[in-house]
Image (spheres, coloured by chain):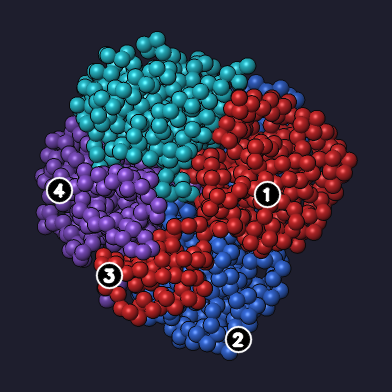
Chain colours: A red, B blue, C purple, D cyan
Amino acid sequence: MIIILRRKTEQSDIDMLRQYLENKGVEYEIVSTIEANFIKIKTFAHLLDLKHINQFSSVLKAVRLSTSAPLVSSEKGKKRKVIELGGVKIGGDEFTVIAGPCSLEDEVLFLNLVKYLKSAGVRIIRAGAYKPRTSPYSFQGLGEKGLDILQKASTELGVLIVTEIMDVRDMDLVYRSSDIIQVGMRNMRNYSLLKEAGKQDKPVLLKRASDATVDEWLLAAEYILNEGNMNVILCERGVTNSLSCKSVILDLNGALEVRNRSILPVIIDPSHAGADRSLVPALARASAAADLDGIMVEVHTSPKTALSDGFQAILPEDFKNLLSDIGKIRNALKG
Amino acid sequence: MIIILRRKTEQSDIDMLRQYLENKGVEYEIVSTIEANFIKIKTFAHLLDLKHINQFSSVLKAVRLSTSAPLVSSEKGKKRKVIELGGVKIGGDEFTVIAGPCSLEDEVLFLNLVKYLKSAGVRIIRAGAYKPRTSPYSFQGLGEKGLDILQKASTELGVLIVTEIMDVRDMDLVYRSSDIIQVGMRNMRNYSLLKEAGKQDKPVLLKRASDATVDEWLLAAEYILNEGNMNVILCERGVTNSLSCKSVILDLNGALEVRNRSILPVIIDPSHAGADRSLVPALARASAAADLDGIMVEVHTSPKTALSDGFQAILPEDFKNLLSDIGKIRNALKG
Amino acid sequence: MIIILRRKTEQSDIDMLRQYLENKGVEYEIVSTIEANFIKIKTFAHLLDLKHINQFSSVLKAVRLSTSAPLVSSEKGKKRKVIELGGVKIGGDEFTVIAGPCSLEDEVLFLNLVKYLKSAGVRIIRAGAYKPRTSPYSFQGLGEKGLDILQKASTELGVLIVTEIMDVRDMDLVYRSSDIIQVGMRNMRNYSLLKEAGKQDKPVLLKRASDATVDEWLLAAEYILNEGNMNVILCERGVTNSLSCKSVILDLNGALEVRNRSILPVIIDPSHAGADRSLVPALARASAAADLDGIMVEVHTSPKTALSDGFQAILPEDFKNLLSDIGKIRNALKG
Amino acid sequence: MIIILRRKTEQSDIDMLRQYLENKGVEYEIVSTIEANFIKIKTFAHLLDLKHINQFSSVLKAVRLSTSAPLVSSEKGKKRKVIELGGVKIGGDEFTVIAGPCSLEDEVLFLNLVKYLKSAGVRIIRAGAYKPRTSPYSFQGLGEKGLDILQKASTELGVLIVTEIMDVRDMDLVYRSSDIIQVGMRNMRNYSLLKEAGKQDKPVLLKRASDATVDEWLLAAEYILNEGNMNVILCERGVTNSLSCKSVILDLNGALEVRNRSILPVIIDPSHAGADRSLVPALARASAAADLDGIMVEVHTSPKTALSDGFQAILPEDFKNLLSDIGKIRNALKG
């Protein structure tokens, strides 16, 4: 960070700023030239709040030159993170496809779908036991009963499970029933939950809030890494916008930027980003062609009777075609 | 809700839809005319998900004619809610001014500020003990120690307290130290927290998420009312937008719409909506002239050394001028 | 502007940047310190494109310290612009109320409405002869016939006229029939039209495009001033957003910012910003309480049969009440 | 369109609505059932304004069942448009790659680049002679001199030319120097220009305004088709949003939706949508994998000295690699 000082400034105003910097524990240096005076922050610039510094009367403009999220940052040539669990790699050269229904509903139907997906090559299954819903009158998920079904699928069918946690008090339950803990987009700013997720020794899949900037998203991930859990997967699932008010749009730009600026794997959720079954395959293929790290897709055997988000789930056979197309794209680009 | 059916539809497709409606427990009626067939939902339409229904192959278009949030709704001539606590009324003909620092920092400074504000006529004090911050490296609030200071202010100075809850596990602590429980904008979609707030017998101040539609905001309030707590104050604090990306803008349109569509009092937070001290008085005056139910303003004796959001806090003397201006506007419009 | 250079840079890369600066005709100075090298732009920084400079490989970060729109800017203590025409002042201590129907429809009805508005104290009448409509099938305005009606109102009733120009080829016609030439929000980026408006000797009312940043809006005004016409009135009329997708919301923050950063009068169009008759009075009162320079309101004797935007026009008697309320607010705040 | 009427309505209110419908020349039918009365619009529903109708006091809710842009619409199984010119097809099974510099600068450099692009397989060249720039102080294009260079490229090198028109008075000049007339995003709502473009017998490339909804974009195209020119290419070039305020993001959802709802070819401009050279190839590959009809890419031999938008132009050799990748993706998905 460089803080450019105003030309005509009282020494007392500069001292107030210096006091602030010293309280924060950063190292800095004052550089005086004929044309301008400025302060160069040498260490711990991420502890400083740009907005705060810009309000000091001695400050003309403060400019951040490095990241405010040092742990997730790819600065200084840090190696990209590859997450390994149960023989599966996420990140690196892999393109990971996670699939499953939006929410758990019926045990038999779910286990049959998991078998189908596994036979198609899927190793990680998604399904929600706790469902955050905009209306209190909508189906809220099976809760603990759903977690039991997930555990059964894991034990009997040998798949890895990702499921969402909504309440910090459920952490132990969710931990026991999953291999990857999902923090949904509505809780991306639930910092208590992020901190708790940061204390677990299982990977966390962190969805981007639909109105979060890339900086905010990275800082949410930083909350988790800062507690010691370095295994975070970032998931873009569509952003709000002024154009298609009924729904979000996929932000490929943001996904590419976050992949570039962080060391973390970045995957796409084309189901929520499409918010319409007919758009899902095209958005998924686009993600594969754009060199991201994977997708998470909602698949349902009977979307029309699904208790949540059926309109965006694709049928098992369409999913198989999509998997095939993605394979072709990945192979073609490697060749 | 009216569900317009497609002309050429198999009976089996219509039956699937009827099965769905029956499972939901709504009463409906099928109306056939020469030109169109449609289904009229007669009761419990708020239990139905418009998106879901529109995906049935037999449906041409489903249209919601009544609200999806019946408890907060002002439909059918329900009386506006006036919340009374400690001799203070919120809503109705009152214009409530809540004031205080963004976060609790120093006990002595805080108590002095509270005395000043009380002498100026303020009855409800705001101050955060738990602070949701975008960066894990920013000041996170004094926590329990802050709650103790709040309780002291309440007991010794006889003011009412509103403070934010961030973690569902802190409910008992926050309950004991406050008269109004605030759910911040980052937790507007933290449904576990909303439900817990709905079980308390103290009013809840619910901030709008900066990207929430009016419908979503009303449904978040509905979560609270649905648990039995009818005393909710809605607070607009600025919305994200594509124009002034650094910050939010005040959404007066949304505040007016939500006040019209619900029975709940609606107040404005001009400090967060302005995100710059110099805009706060104008936005606060605008809120008073637009006939909303109040404002919540950040005041700080030394904004430049504030540990959070100092750039948007106004000085005590500027606050006094603002109070005076607001009084003039309210009187002029009554006269 | 200050251009901070990278530490390890080839001299040839710096020379390429210097060459660029010299081609632009700006004066600059290279400042070397132990900690950083930077280039300080001394004159004509507004000619430089920040994005462009940031792409030079020698540049770490370029920071703009002054405005990119020097003619409209309030920097350096320039006096605020007060526009005088026909005995009316716009800007300064005045609060100007412009009123009239959205579009010209019927001559008799229009002249009667103008008489009514004039008797209520309105000196400037708005009405569109050319109407930009989203659909080619919507009413497109009376065109030249409408301009004739405007001229009649001006001559016979002694009011000032503001009307919109849509096509650069109509400049002479519009010039003859109006006292203030309006450039609508859809043409804020029609630079040919802005330049042509800049060549006229009548004031220009420039509406903000609904997705324009404050910087862009100021630069659109700069196009007009740069051609010699210094009499520009800025008009905020609502911005697109992700929340109320059917319509815009009033951006009071932006209006206040643009008023602060420029010397130009800034008015509000509460009719388009409200996009609903029921919101117009509250937004208009809010504008008066926020110390802006005026409003432009749509009034119609029979909104339901209006050929355009009837849903946002208020009735003459409601307008009279609004005028009265605005007077009260302005007086109260002065007193 | 179906207009659902309120239960208790005066006959005179219904008559007012009927009068309105009759004035518009639409055919309609009043359907009465025990449960509801509604009006079914049978023909010319696109002439009706939904907002307008919803304001009649007799109307509970009006619902549009068919398109408001009948000429561009893909309703009723109309065949997709394939545009043929100079032996090149746009739309259908083709994936068209248009390339060239942002603006014309130097004749020799331009002609060399065109030769290079042609040898790589490009048949359509883009380059701007008239440049719409946010600042009046930015390079405004070579104007007529630029058009001469374009004509030379066309004649001597046998390529097709697409170039932007900004001013309706330049139509003849631009017509003579180009094969496809581009209407840029800033002029998408310049209806005079759209109408003039609709009178030409050359294809029009219509860029989406960065804040236009899909409906608005389709209606802008409808303006052109309505004048008789059926050869319109739609081009998505990024949309404004609240997340990455410095720039736009690619809206693949919108591009896919507009391709589905219209008969027109839809291409992507990954250069403006990426607004950063490093994002362009990924976004271009994504477009190819998503089955859109083509891309338009900015290529420059020396992006750093480009007079406009150099930061988003890719180098000729990177363009060649991109072309190769796109070929691989298209072949893989066909196979």
Above or below for C141 versus C216 = above
- Chain of the residue under label 2: B
Tell me, yes or no, if residue B169 can be seen here: yes
Q: Are marks 1 and 2 in contact (CB under 8 Å)?
A: no
Which residue is label 1 attached to?
Answer: A205
- Chain of the residue under label 3: A
As helix, strand or loop, the secondary structure at mark 1 comes to strand
**Residue at position x 57%, y 31% from top?**
A289
- Measure the C-alpha gap from mark 1 to mark 2: 42 Å
Q: Are marks 3 and 4 in contact (CB under 8 Å)?
A: no
**Residue at position x 46%, y 75% from top?**
A20
The disc labelled 4 sits on which kind of residue?
A: Asn
Which residue is label 3 attached to?
Answer: A7
- Chain of the residue under label 4: C
- Chain of the residue under label 1: A
Residue B308 x/y as whole percent: 50, 71
Q: Do the residues labelled 2 and 4 touch (CB within 8 Å)?
A: no
Which residue is label 2 attached to?
Answer: B152
| Of marks 1 and 4, the one in the foreground | 1
Which quadrant does the N terminus of chain A fall into? bottom left
Q: Residue C170 sits in which quadrant?
A: top left
Q: Residue A123 sits in which quadrant?
A: top right
Say left or right for C190 vs A302.
left
Above or below for B282 versus B161 = above
As helix, strand or loop, the secondary structure at mark 4 comes to loop
- Measure the C-alpha gap from mark 3 to mark 4: 34 Å
Few, some or many residues within 10 Å of mark 3 (<14, 14–19, 20+): few
- Measure the C-alpha gap from mark 3 to mark 2: 45 Å
Which residue is label 4 attached to?
Answer: C229
Do marks 1 and 2 share a chain? Answer: no
The disc labelled 1 sits on which kind of residue?
A: Leu
**Residue at position x 51%, y 80% from top?**
B123
